[in-house]
Image (tube, grey):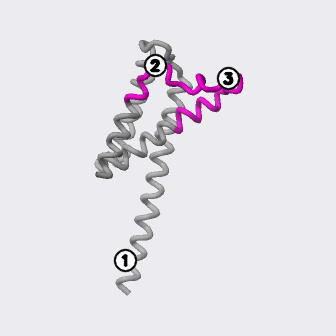
């Protein structure tokens, strides 16, 4: 049941990417800056990538799936050329890749730390 919830979250977030006029600048006035846009895009793709890694454990191998997610990110950004009231941006694409990369680095670091603590626990059990 828990995995079903996360699968729905992943699918819903993909659909949200294609909704016209779903952009934070709509909610901010003159205080909206580029760094907020970078934070929005990279944060969204950080959460999206982390959810995918959690739901689909077979996707945790770094090399092929990392580039697949980046490819999907690029395709979604390019698709905005044809979606009304959406715009293509290289900075947005870079922010997406930043979020994906940070999610993979965090996932990898946490996995390594957990494996190291399990190894130490196993060694102490054997003694």
Whole-percent x, y for residue 32 in the image: 67, 26
Q: Which residue is mark 1?
A: 122
Q: Secondary structure at mark 2?
A: loop
Q: Is 85 left or right of 31, judged from the image as shown?
A: left
Q: Sequence order check: which comes first, mark 3 or mark 2? A: 2
Asked whether residue 24 is drawn in magenta, I would say yes
Whole-percent x, y for residue 43 in the image: 53, 39
- Disc 2 to disc 1: CB gap under 8 Å: no
Q: Tell which of 1 and 46 is nearer to you.
A: 1
Q: Which residue is mark 2?
A: 20
Whole-percent x, y for residue 48 in the image: 43, 39
Q: Which mark is in front, 1 or 3?
A: 3
Q: Secondary structure at mark 3?
A: loop
- Disc 3 to disc 2: CB gap under 8 Å: no
Mark 2 to mark 1 CA distance (whole Å): 52 Å
Tell me: residue 24, above or below residue 116: above
Quarter holding residue 38:
top right
Q: Secondary structure at mark 1?
A: helix
Whole-percent x, y for residue 64 in the image: 33, 40
Residue at 71% from the left image edge and 22% from the top image edge: 30
Mark 1 to mark 3 CA distance (whole Å): 56 Å
Q: Which residue is mark 3?
A: 29
Residue at 28% from the left image edge and 48% from the top image edge: 58
Q: Sequence order check: which comes first, mark 2 or mark 1? A: 2
Residue at 50% from the left image edge and 39% from the top image edge: 99
Badge 3 density bin: few <14, some 14–19, many ≥20, Cα 10 Å:
few
Which quarter of the figure is the C terminus placed in? bottom left
Asked whether residue 60 is drawn in magenta, I would say no
Tell me: residue 56, above or below residue 71: below
Badge 2 density bin: few <14, some 14–19, many ≥20, Cα 10 Å:
few
Task: Identify the magenta region.
Answer: 15-43
Report the number of discs.
3
């Amino acid at each position: 049941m828990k995995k079903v919830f996360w699968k729905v979250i992943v699918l819903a977030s993909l659909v949200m990417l294609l909704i016209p006029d779903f952009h934070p600048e709509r909610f901010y006035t003159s205080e909206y800056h580029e760094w907020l846009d970078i934070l929005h895009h990279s944060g969204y793709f950080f959460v999206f990538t982390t959810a995918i890694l959690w739901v689909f454990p077979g996707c945790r191998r770094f090399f092929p799936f990392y580039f697949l997610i980046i490819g999907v990110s690029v395709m979604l950004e390019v698709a905005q050329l044809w979606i009304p009231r959406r715009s293509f941006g290289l900075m947005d694409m870079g922010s997406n890749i930043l979020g994906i990369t940070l999610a993979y680095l965090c996932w990898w670091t946490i996995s390594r730390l957990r494996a190291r603590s399990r190894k130490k626990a196993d060694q102490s059990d054997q003694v």
